[in-house]
Amino acid sequence: MPSHGSITKAGKVRSQTPKIEAKPKRSLVPRIRNRFNFEKRLVAVSQQTV
C-alpha cells in the first residue's frame, strides 16, 4: 500500500513553526456569568412583550 510521502518528513512544518505562548484567559465568576445570561434571555424578552 503506497504512502503519501516518507515517514522521515513527518511533523516537519510543526517543528519549524515558532511557539507562541497562549494568552491568559480571564472568565467571569460563574455566578455573575449566569446572571448576565439570565438578564439577556428573560429580562430583555419580557421588556419586548410589554
Image (tube, rainbow, N blue to C red):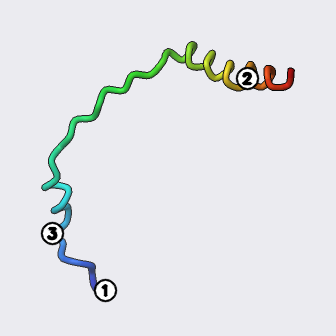
Q: Which residue is mark 3?
A: 9
Q: Please state if 12 lies on the left or on the right of 30 as rendered.
A: left
Picture quadrant where residue 3 is located: bottom left
Q: CA distance from mark 1 to mark 2?
A: 61 Å
Q: Are marks 1 and 2 in contact (CB under 8 Å)?
A: no
**Element marked by disc 1:** loop
Question: x, y percentage for residue 11?
Answer: 19, 61
Q: Nearer the viewer, residue 30 or 44?
A: 44
> Quarter holding the N terminus?
bottom left
Numbered label attached to residue 44: 2
**Element marked by disc 2:** helix
Q: Is residue 18 above or below residue 24?
A: below
> Which circle, 3 or 1, is nearer the viewer?
3
Q: CA distance from mark 2 to mark 3?
A: 56 Å
Label located before the other in sequence (3 or 1): 1
Q: Which residue is mark 1?
A: 1
Q: Please state if 33 lies on the left or on the right of 5 as rendered.
A: right
